[in-house]
Each structure stands twice: as C-alpha cells, then as structure tokens.
Image (cartoon, grey):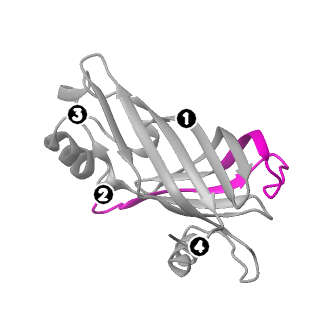
Amino acid sequence: MLRTLAIAAMVVGLDLPQDKELLRLERSRITFLSEAPMETITAANTRSTGLLDPATRSFAVQVPMAEFEGFNSPLQREHFNENYLESAVHPKATFKGRIIEAVDLRTPGTHTIRAKGELSIKGIVRERIVPCTMVVSANEVRITGSFDVALDEHEIRVPRVVQQKIAPVVQVKLDLLFSSSPAK
C-alpha cells in the first residue's frame, strides 16, 4: 500500500526520498455542498489516498471522483460523473503542496495552519491556500478545513436548464487523518 502511495505521490510531484518517514492518509472524508435556489446537493468521499512528509511539511492527496456518494438521486450522481466532472477522463482530483506555517509535525498540539498548493480538478490546476486546523498527536496528524471551489475555474459547465439547481460555487470540507502506524 505504501509503495502505491509513493508512486501516486511521485505522479503528482511530491519528492519522496527513500529514507524519510512519511505519514500515510489513514482515513479521509471529503464532502461537497452545492446550495442553489432550487436544490441542495451534498456528497461525500472516504476513499482518498495521500502522504504527508513531516520534515518538509509537504503533502499530496488524490481523490477518486467516481467514489463520491450521497446526492439526491442516482441520476444526479451519474450526471456528476459523466457530464460535469467527466470522471472517466479525469478520474482523480489532486491537491499537492506544503503547510505554510513552520509547525513541527512531530510535537503534539493543535495549530491553525494554511495549506498552500495546486488543486487539480478535471486536469485544470489552480493555486489554493486552504485554512485548516491541524491536531498533532502520537503517530497521527489530523487536518480539517473547508474552502470554496468556483465551478468555472475548473471548466465545469452547468447547462442553463439546471443553473437554478447547481450552485456556481460549491463548499468543500475535508477531514484527513495521516498516520505513521502500520495499516490495520
């Protein structure tokens, strides 16, 4: 599993020397919320993978787009994957970057941080700074936060007929637990 994550991190550009202790994304929950005048849509994904390098505070996370569940109907999920995110062509969203603040990820405590990096959705890369809360404990780092994504920034086109049902800006929430513990 760690080998797969290391390969995935290299694909998204995270430099991973072999002698470094990396934290693996053990548990994740990424949700999005679209609040439009005629409809509210929410979905969640618990199948992300990722790595966090405590020494350099760099990270890489991949989110498989077809794994979002929830929605208001199966047809809505189908449209999300086929028409809007084109999940067959762009199966993963990625976020890679660094924690801006000079926080020691090996010392227990709670910190307000900013994660700065490149968010790629549908192959369209945008720089983002995401405010987060980070809780460091023995062998674990939990990061929570939220940010907005404007659909047009990632060339996600919403047909005029459903514009009252899909918000032009969606809220994304993340809850990521990185761990150095062996897989359970």
Rate crowding at label 2 as few (under 14), some (14 to 19) or many (20 or more) other CA atoms within 10 Å.
many
Number of the label disc, if any, that sits on residue 80: none
Residue 23, image x and y in percent?
66, 65
Q: Nearer the viewer, mark 2 or mark 3?
A: 2
Q: Distance between the residues labelled 1 and 3?
A: 24 Å
Q: What stretch is highlighted in magenta?
A: 87-116
Residue 77, image x and y in percent?
22, 45
Q: Earlier in the sequence, mark 4 or mark 1?
A: 1
Asked which quadrant contains residue 14, the reply is bottom right
Q: Distance between the residues labelled 4 and 1?
A: 31 Å
Number of the label disc, if any, that sits on residue 87: 2
Q: How far apart are marks 2 and 3 (CA)?
A: 18 Å
Q: Do the residues labelled 1 and 3 touch (CB within 8 Å)?
A: no
Rate crowding at label 1 as few (under 14), some (14 to 19) or many (20 or more) other CA atoms within 10 Å.
some
Three-letter amino acid code at disc 3? Answer: Pro
Label 4 sits on residue? 182
Label 1 sits on residue? 147
Asked which quadrant contains residue 104, the reply is bottom right
Instruction: Please state which of residues 132 and 155 is positioned toward the viewer in this rendering.
Output: 132
Q: Is residue 4 among what the camera can see?
A: yes
Label 3 sits on residue? 159
Q: Which of marks 4 and 3 is in front?
A: 4
Q: Which residue is drawn at 41% across and 60% down?
A: 92
Q: Is residue 151 among what the camera can see?
A: no
Q: Which of marks 4 and 3 is nearer the N terminus?
A: 3
Q: Earlier in the sequence, mark 2 or mark 3?
A: 2
Q: Earlier in the sequence, mark 1 or mark 3?
A: 1
